[in-house]
Amino acid sequence: MLELRPSCEHCNTNLPSNSTEAMICTFECTYCKTCAIEVFENVCPNCTGNFVERPIRPSKYLEKYPSSTKKIFKPKDLEFTKKNTEKYKDIQPIKR
Ligand SMILES: [Zn+2]
Ligand SMILES: [Zn+2]
């Protein structure tokens, strides 16, 4: 089950469970769309994988399966992540 982390790791924007702005990688590193697509160009700065839109959990399940309340806020050193992005952004996710 996805944790549904409550915020963007890079800019700390709130990403509630029903947000359409939440993007996740295969390890569920969680970023807002602006960070995932515009800043990191679809290269996860932690694992180099791609991002997809986080699915929205229907509200009827949230009581039994609540979203995480544990914020992870680890802003990236953009000079370093830029190198990562440049190295991987033109490689299809399936070949990374
Ligand atoms: Zn963000
Ligand atoms: Zn990742």
Image (cartoon, rainbow, N blue to C red):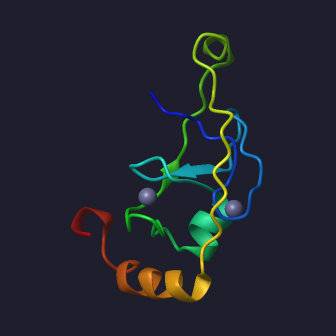
Task: Please determine whether, in this image, residue 25 is positioned above or below residue 48.
Answer: above
Q: Residue at x 31, y 76 (%)?
A: 91
Image side of residue 1 versus residue 53, left or right: left
Image quadrant, ligand 2:
bottom left
Vertical placement of 24 versus 79: above or below? Answer: above
Q: Position of residue 42 (x, y in %)?
A: 49, 68
Q: Is 55 placed above or below 71 here?
A: above
Residue at the spot 58% in from the left edge and 68% down from the top edge:
37
Q: Using the rendered view, name the quadrant where residue 34 is placed.
A: bottom right
Residue sitting at x 32%, y 65% = 93
From the viewer's side, name the closer residue of 28 and 51: 28
Q: Is residue 96 left or right of residue 59?
A: left
Q: Position of residue 32 (x, y in %)?
A: 66, 56
Could you tell whether 81 is left or right of 7 in the image? left
Q: Residue at x 60, y 83 (%)?
A: 78
Q: Percent from the top left, x then y, of residue 7?
A: 70, 48
Q: Position of residue 4 (x, y in %)?
A: 59, 36
